[in-house]
Image (cartoon, helix red, strand yellow):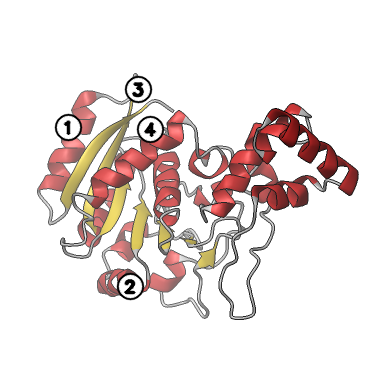
């Protein structure tokens, strides 16, 4: 479900709206239903949202969504209808325990390699093997950065098994590979409609020579330009089993977060990947074990 449009005054400033107005619009309550809610609210001394829930005219998710609008917190109700995959729990279920984990990781990064007093870096997300949850982790982490109200770009640089466009419900088109090959004719960065501040740069045309593209000098210039345009830049990379792609990308980004999957990823593969990254110029932000 797409969010109702923000209401602005004549000067273009955002106008705060009551929970009642937001729920009324979301659930298309008529005057009679609103009056029933108000009567219940007065009789029981509860808030409008609680009264609407009690009368089964709204759900708890509706009230949480309305609160998120009041606090200008991007939140897409019912992910499938907004085009977002249910895997994007930070967007579709932002008050869950899973989403809280991503906010905790975000906080640690903002106090570490992505702190304001640190050199400007992009963050590459790497994993030893396909299926470790790297794409899921990168996507949700990027969403939490955008929820700070700051411009965030997620780059799908997995030119082996790209999937970010599927999670965000976007059509694949020209993207990173086209830029690096000098074949992008227009701005290929796509804003995510349901999440203000969130942008995606897809892989683009799958190339026969992904590693060679990543090692071209213009990749560094592209990253420098993007770091000036966005507050936060995160990069989804190919799994290490495909070769050196991820390590090259980590060096280009300047920082790396390594993801493994509990009960699946071999510890020696995880240690080997961390060791290889450590020999580059990339700063290792941490190692996470994913249970998804």
Residue 271 vs residue 19: left or right?
Answer: left
Relative depth, front residue between 34 and 150: 34
Distance in Å between CA atoms under marks 1 and 4: 15 Å
Secondary structure at badge 4 equals loop
Category of crowding for the residue at label 3, using alpha-carbon neighbours closer than 10 angstroms: few (below 14), some (14–19), many (at least 20)? few
The residue wearing badge 2 is 222
Residue 39 x/y as whole percent: 80, 36
In this rendering, is residue 131 above or below 11? above
Dot 2: few (<14), some (14–19), or many (≥20) neighbours within 10 Å? some
User: In which quadrant is the C terminus drawn?
Assistant: top left
Question: Dot 4 corresponds to which residue?
Answer: 132
Q: Tell me the CA gap for discs 3 and 4.
A: 8 Å
Q: Which residue in the structure is indicated by mark 3?
A: 264
Which residue, given by chain and number where applicable, does mark 1 sit on?
Answer: 271
Q: Residue at x 13, y 53 (%)?
A: 280
Looking at the picture, how far across and down is residue 160, in whole percent? 43, 49
Query: What residue is rendered at 27% in x and 72% in y?
Result: 224
Earlier in the chain: of badge 1 and badge 3, it is 3
* Numbered mark located on residue 138 in the image: none
Judging from the image, what secondary structure is the residue with disc 3 in?
Answer: loop
Q: Vertical placement of 277 versus 39: above or below?
A: below
Q: Residue at x 33, y 43 (%)?
A: 242
Residues at discs 3 and 2 in contact (Cβ within 8 Å): no
Marks 3,4: beta carbons within 8 A: yes
Image x and y of residue 187, in percent: 50, 76
State left or right for residue 24 relative to residue 109: right
167 vs 101, nearest the viewer: 101
């Amino acid at each position: 479900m797409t969010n109702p449009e923000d209401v602005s005054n004549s000067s273009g400033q955002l106008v705060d709206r009551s929970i009642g107005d937001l729920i009324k619009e979301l659930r298309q309550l008529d005057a009679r239903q609103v009056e029933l809610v108000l009567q219940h609210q007065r009789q029981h001394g509860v808030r409008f949202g609680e009264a609407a829930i009690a009368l089964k005219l709204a759900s708890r998710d509706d009230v949480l969504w309305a609160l998120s609008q009041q606090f200008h917190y991007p939140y897409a109700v019912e992910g499938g209808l907004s085009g977002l995959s249910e895997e994007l729990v930070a967007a579709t279920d932002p008050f869950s325990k899973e989403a809280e984990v991503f906010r905790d990781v975000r906080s640690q990064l903002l106090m570490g390699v992505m702190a304001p007093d640190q050199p400007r870096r992009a963050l590459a997300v790497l994993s030893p093997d396909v299926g470790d949850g790297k794409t899921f982790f990168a996507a949700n982490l990027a969403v939490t950065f955008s929820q700070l109200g700051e411009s965030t770009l997620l780059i799908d640089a997995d030119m082996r098994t790209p999937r970010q466009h599927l999670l965000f419900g976007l059509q694949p088109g020209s993207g990173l590979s086209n830029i690096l090959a000098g074949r992008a004719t227009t701005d290929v960065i796509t804003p995510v409609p349901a999440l203000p501040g969130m942008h995606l740069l897809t892989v683009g045309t799958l190339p026969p020579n992904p590693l060679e593209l990543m090692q071209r000098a213009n990749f560094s210039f592209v990253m420098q330009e993007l770091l000036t345009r966005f507050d936060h830049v995160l990069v989804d990379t190919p799994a290490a089993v495909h070769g050196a792609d991820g390590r090259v990308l980590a060096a280009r980004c300047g920082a790396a977060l390594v993801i493994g999957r509990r009960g699946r990823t071999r510890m020696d593969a995880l240690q080997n990947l961390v060791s290889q990254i450590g020999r580059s110029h990339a700063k290792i932000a941490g190692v996470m074990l994913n249970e998804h």
